[in-house]
Amino acid sequence: MTNIVETYNLTKIYNKTIRAVDDISIEIQEGEIFGLLGPNGAGKTTTIHMLATITRPTSGSARVGGYDVLREPRKVRAITGYSAQEAGVDEYSSGREYLTLFGHYYHLDNRTIRSRVDELLELLELTDAADRLVATYSGGMRKRLEIGTALMHRPQLLVVDEPTLGLDIQTRVRIWDYIRALNKDGMSILLTTHYLEETDKLCDRVAIVDHGRVVALGTPDELKGEIHGDVVSLTLPVEEPDQHAQTIEKVRQLLSAQPFVKDVQPTAEALNIYVDQGGVAVPQILRLLEASGLTVGEIALARPSLDDVFLKYTGRKIREEKGKAVGARAAWIRRPR
């Protein structure tokens, strides 16, 4: 299968010391939804900025649709649609006017612009609000409009940075539906996210990114399959805050020594205990802790998640934080074609 994106040792260093992206090599196939999953500051946005020709790589190379991002940036932009992390839309234009403006940015003729605007308004369920000021739009409507601007020129690749950041779950599901519909029509999609559920539900493959490096890559099921068995999540009541860390370490050592426990990973709030048979292990864990005079706060049993995969490779869980707009959208559209 042909690759729509190929990167080789792609690296971005700021101020000669800050390695935002560190030697990333990935291949994204035509027609797939590919996710970059990781916490804020992991290097996801910097990576897609280099692919969208917003930021120049320090070293390494990248090709989009066969075009080199450094030597052929205009050709890359001609086949790429970019939607920024936050919808920085013009509140004093209508939705129709805003989409029309982007049609001119892409040098489309007036007839094509009118046709595309009507198509996109219908696709994004904004027809009824097309002639209202964007200032009256909800957050979800603004995000859909922002995605619409990236689709005006029918790109081969849609690059979406945190498509549902800060949106309620109902709106997130609708955005997911739009992305699936675009992909079903043949569009390749690259998205960044720190939402585990988003990756699980949308992505054909995912690269888990941390500190600028790809630490794991595969389908969501393949990655979760690396952690065999069940996950028991255990919290301990904080009776003596000064001694809490020591108590957690005592429990970790106690459980790590048990033959039925494969691994124990501390998190900020709990201990994750990896076992083959969770239903059998839970009562054994409770008996062990009771015999040692330790009190359990909460205990839960679950199948492995992508968060467990991230924990395995990095020693911590993904921090689900709100990000800030990076202002890259305007820089991208102002570049001459």
Image (spheres, rainbow, N blue to C red):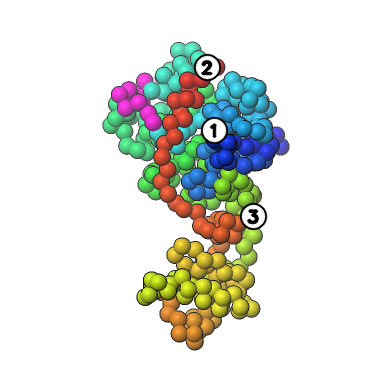
Nearest the camera: 262 or 187? Answer: 262
* Residue 20 percent location from the top left of the image: 56, 40
| Dot 1: element | helix
Task: Find the distance from the CA under tag 3 to the CA under tag 2.
Answer: 42 Å
Q: Main secondary structure of the magenta part?
A: loop
- The residue lying furthest to the bottom in this view is 291
Per the image, the residue denoted by label 1 is: 49
Please state which amino acid type lies under the numbered disc 1. Answer: His
**Residue drawn where x is 47% and y is 75% of the image:** 247
The quarter of the picture where the C terminus appears is top right
Q: Is residue 74 magenta?
A: no
Task: Find the distance from the CA under tag 2 to the CA under tag 1.
Answer: 16 Å
Please state which amino acid type lies under the numbered disc 2. Answer: Pro
Write down the region rendered in magenta.
88-97
- Can you tell which quarter of the image residue 297 is in? bottom left
The quarter of the picture where the N terminus appears is top right
Per the image, the residue denoted by label 3 is: 222
- Earlier-in-chain disc, 3 versus 2: 3
Per the image, the residue denoted by label 2 is: 336
* Residue 256 percent location from the top left of the image: 59, 75
